[in-house]
Every structure is written in structure tokens, then in C-alpha cells.
Image (cartoon, rainbow, N blue to C red):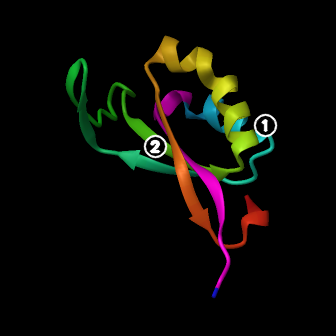
Amino acid sequence: MIETVIRKRIEILADKPLAGRVTDAIERVGITGWTMLPVLAGSGRDGRWQDERITGADKVVLLTIASQEKAALLAEAIAPILTSHGFVLTMWDVEVIRGERF
């Protein structure tokens, strides 16, 4: 049977023009990989929204997997912009194969 290890899966919903600040923080804390996915629409506390390429209000989800320690460092690093820019960060345990990669 293949052995797995527990890591943290982190998803961050952010405005696309500010995504570079998140990817910089990801790399600064030593997380070696991330993926950026476009988001077309959603709904939240302030109501519905959708991708708006004309005004630059489109959103992305940044996805990464990291150790508990690096995940905590990332959360701490981006905490100020989570509040000031209304980003959303979710994190949960996942099982991965080849845990040394994360």
C-alpha cells in the first residue's frame, strides 16, 4: 500500500491585480509551488459578483499545498491583506503521496 502524509491544502480567493502579493508571500515562506485559477463568479457577504475584465475586478483562487509549519507562516504573512482587501483563505488537511515535495 502506498503511504501518504498529511499536509495543508490552502486556497486563497484574491483580486487578480493583487495576486502577485500572495504568490510572493507563498515563495517567501518557502512553499515551492502554487497554482492560480480564474474565478468567473460568486456570491458573498456583499452579494453576487462576476468576472469583470474591463475594470480589473476579476478574481483568482491561488492553490498550494504545504507543511503545517509553512501553512502557518503563510497565513501570518498575508493576514494584513486578508482583512484590508477582503481576501478569503481556507485551509484543511489533505493526504498526499510524496510528502517530501510539500
- Residue 26 included in the magenta stretch of the image: no
Left or right of 14, for residue 81: right
Residue at the limit of the structure toward the top, as seen here? 84
Q: Where is residue 84 in the image (x, y as percent from the top left)?
A: 51, 11
Task: Classify the position of the N terminus by image quarter.
Answer: bottom right
Query: Measuring 55% from the left and 51% from the top, which residue is drawn there?
Result: 93
Callout 2: SS: strand
Q: Where is residue 23 in the image (x, y as percent from the top left)?
A: 65, 38
Place residue 47 in its image quadrant: top left
Amino acid on which disc 1 is placed: Val
Q: Return the x and y of residue 68 as percentages of the image width and height.
A: 70, 44
Per the model, the C-alpha gap separating discs 1 and 2 is 19 Å
Could you say which quadrant of the image residue 29 lies in?
top right
Give the quarter of the figure containing the C terminus. Answer: bottom right
Chief secondary structure of the magenta span? strand
Farthest residue to the front: give it.
1
Q: Which mark is residue 13?
A: none
Q: SS class of the residue under badge 1? A: loop
Above-or-below relation of 34 to 85: below
Residue 98 against residue 29 in the figure, above or below? below
Residue at the image point whose x is 39% and y is 28% from the top: 56
- Confirm whether residue 39 shows in the render: yes
Q: Give the range drawn in magenta.
A: 2-18
Q: Is residue 70 left or right of residue 49?
A: right
Q: Mark 2 highlights which residue?
A: 61
Question: To which quarter of the image does residue 71 belong?
Answer: top right
Q: Nearer the viewer, mark 1 or mark 2?
A: 1
**What numbered label is drawn on residue 29?**
1
Residue shown at the point (56%, 34%) measured from the top left: 19
Residue 29 in the image: above or below residue 81? below
Q: Where is residue 5 in the image (x, y as percent from the top left)?
A: 67, 65
Question: Could you tell whether 12 is left or right of 71 in the image?
Answer: left
